[in-house]
Image (tube, rainbow, N blue to C red):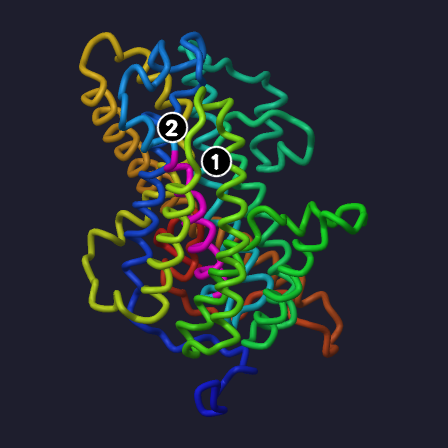
Amino acid sequence: MSRTTLRGENSTAAPARRGRLVALDGLRLIAALMVVFHHYVGFGGGPTASENAWGRPVSQVFHHASAFGGYLWTGFCLFFIISGFVICMSSWGRGLGDFFTSRVMRLYPAFWVSVLATTAVLTLWPVVRKPLDAYSVLANMTMLAEPLGYKVVDSVYWTLWIELRFYLLFALVVWRGVTYRRVVAFCVLWTVGGLVSGSVKIPGLELFAMSEVSSFFVAGLAFYLMHRFGPNLLLWGIVVLSWILSLRYAGDHQGDLTGYLGRALPSWPALLLVTLSYLVVAAVALGFTARIQWRWLTVAGALTYPLYLLHEYIGWTAIRLLRNHAQPWVVVGVVTLGMLLAAWLVHRLIERPLAPLLKRGLRGAFEQLRAAEPATGAPRVGVQAPAAVTSQQDGDLVGAARPAP
């Protein structure tokens, strides 16, 4: 690639404002609905009648559709690729304080509501899953229940601990200033760390190497560099290696799901869906979806995170209560629409009002921190670029939502 193509590769300046990548919002919605379909139609909560929301194995309820649903866990793979893409985009030209503020604003309001709502539903109707004790619920409110050794209120929260570790690692790049070379170096080092973590016994290495899923985030980072600077052989090499590692994980994970699904399924459809996830994000990165500007997709992008957080245990409870009153597909449709409505309410009544309050509070705290620092050349910690960024730039696995920092 010529030097002209990579002009600005060492710059940490914020990118020029471009049209919103509306297609990413649509992909978020697709990924979220894939996971919903997997949990409602492909899984149901367990292979036995007693632990399944339908009161019997899903293979007896949906037959062939349940087999297809057994592969749609791959929606979270698409989430992770998008997360790498958007986190790189949103952190370019911004300081560590902005990065931290945007993550707290985006993740915690909907998460707090989800923890409390799920606990309330399971307390009132403990028909599929039982509620946790009050102390465990309190630990969940930190989003650190898993590393603290507590059970999670809803099993979908497992992806959040993965996301948090990715943010912590990428914060090192943000701290120094996000540039083309630093992002490429991060991709290479993280990939190497994942490859060697299984054979090199270094305490804590696998905790951050995340060898099973890091390839998805790395691919997303590389796709954003393609979007910003254009594709080249190095970036394609990173993507192809990440794709190969992702296929290995997908095949292994599909096999691991046999006990949960109550039947063995061939792995090739999972590999195909992961490959399609790579292809659709590549299409966005290379500009093939630039003409898609449907405004309703922006709303869809705002709903994906609360939908993801709310849908599983609350949805299973609703299915158990409704399963004898309507046909299975009607129940799936009603519960899914109900979860979408609940997600919209969380976004409209919780996320949007709380975001400015958190933004002001955290920015004020970082401004005080900066004011207390000596005037040295130390790396910046506080807020940079006071102008608001687009809601999509602040998105990730969880979907973007206004208002953004």
In percent of width and height, residue 123 lies at: 46, 13
Q: Is residue 197 above or below residue 94?
A: above
Residue ID for mark 2: 39
Residue in the image at 72% along x and 78% along y: 377
Residue in the image at 31% along x and 17% along y: 319
In percent of width and height, residue 298 lies at: 27, 54
Question: Label 1 crowding class (10 Å Cα cut-off): few <14, some 14-19, many 20+?
Answer: many
In percent of width and height, residue 59 lies at: 33, 19
Query: Between residues 116 and 231, which one lies in front from this camera angle?
Result: 231
Quadrant of res 185: bottom right
In the rendered structure, the answer to whether residue 112 lies left or right of residue 380 reads: left
Q: Write down the region rendered in magenta.
A: 71-88
Q: Earlier in the sequence, mark 2 or mark 1?
A: 2
Q: Is residue 78 magenta?
A: yes
Quadrant of res 47: top left
In the image, what residue type sits under mark 1?
Gln
In percent of width and height, residue 253 lies at: 52, 37
Q: Is residue 330 above or below residue 341?
A: above
Query: Between residues 388 and 48, which one lies in front from this camera angle?
Result: 48
Q: Of helix, strand and loop, which one carries label 1?
A: helix
Question: Any mark on residue 254, and which?
Answer: 1
Query: Between residues 148 and 363, which one lies in front from this camera angle?
Result: 148
In the rendered structure, the answer to whether residue 366 lies left or right of residue 244 reads: right
